[in-house]
Image (cartoon, rainbow, N blue to C red):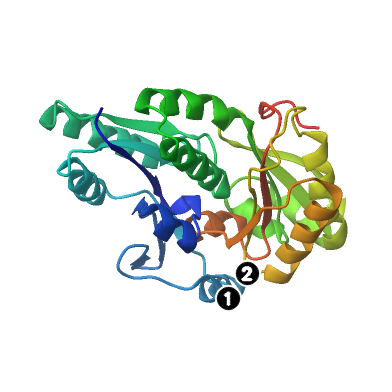
Amino acid sequence: MRAYCITTDSNSDLPQEYIEKFGTTIIPQYYSFGDVVYGDELHMSPKEFYEKMKEGALPQSQANNPAVIEDKFRDILDKGMDIIHIAFSSALSGSYNNVCMVANELMEEYPDAKITVIDTLNVSLGETIMVIHAENLKANDVAYEDVVAELNEFRNHINVQFTVDDLFHLQRGGRVSKATAVLGSTLNLKPFLYVNRDGGLTSDGTVRGRKKSISKLVDRMIETMAENTDFSLPVGIVHGNCIEEAETLASIVKEKTQFTNVIINDISPSIGAHAGPGALGLVYYGGIKAPAKEAK
């Protein structure tokens, strides 16, 4: 049986400690401010990125680069290893299709190799939880095909709920209307969104005030947890330059549930370009994700 490795993209927000632990190959995603493109050799710290947005600069997210994907995959294939790539949702980016295109071309060149691209139908630490799960299976000598089958089922249970602090960025991305953004800002309404079963974003109500929105995230988590939830799995919390509120959310999760392993990380710029400063997301293994039209 050929050896295999797990790869993912920078939209996974996989923490550096896990990248080093697993030796994970990361496919970079890109974003730009004006004519300056970031994401590969040129980087911007999360704090600097969100401060720039607060000052009024508008970033643009971009897909991955097929040439970079090819180089990174070729390095792995040349070592005689197969690849399972855990990809950002195809409903939110063309990056998944780019990886599939490169994978198909390389498998023609390397006929003995296998490259499987898993469409996670998810984002951010939702991908990270899948990477960790895949690496745990691999460490237990689970066969390549069995890992692929497990991930295709596992992805349906990775729930992502999040709230944003400023409706302007959602309005700019077409998620809410201008009238809704103006009214929401006036009334201090904080919207909820979730990643639906098809990997897209669904708007799902509002509450008034930031503190209530943070507490409500955990309530929504509890409402959607599976009966057989494995509490040994990590919970993910991602934030747009609001670490104190992320830590508050982590404390509430530990207080109200049996989860003890909480991963906190910044939202990658290519996602933060749409969510904006103050975005706060909660990622966990729960019941099967809701479809787009069944908002609570």
Looking at the image, which is closer to me, 284 or 233? 233
User: Which of the numbered marks, if any, corresponds to residue 241?
Assistant: 2
Which quadrant of the figure has residue 82? Answer: top left
Q: Residue 58 location in percent, x, y?
A: 51, 65
Snapshot quadrant of residue 195: top right
**Residue located 79% across and 60% down the image:** 251
Q: On the rendered structure, is 32 left or right of 197? A: left
Q: How many marks?
A: 2
Vertical order, 38 against 18 (above or below) = below
Kindly identify the amino acid type of the residue bearing the numbered disc 1.
Glu
Image quadrant occupied by the N terminus: top left
Camera-near label (1 vs 2) is 2
Q: Which residue is mark 1?
A: 51
> In the image, what residue type sits under mark 2?
Asn
Quadrant (top left/top right/bottom left/bottom right) for the C terminus = top right
- 71, 166: nearer the viewer: 71
- x 70%, y 34%: residue: 286
Q: Looking at the image, which residue sits at the far front?
A: 140
Residue 30 locus on image (x, y percent) = 38, 57
Asked whether disc 1 touches disc 2, contact meaning CB atoms under 8 Å apart, the reply is yes
Q: Secondary structure beneath disc 1? A: helix
Q: Quadrant of residue 61?
A: bottom left
Classed neighbour count for the residue bearing mark 2: other residues with Cα under 10 Å, few (<14), some (14–19), many (≥20):
many
Q: Is residue 270 visible?
A: yes
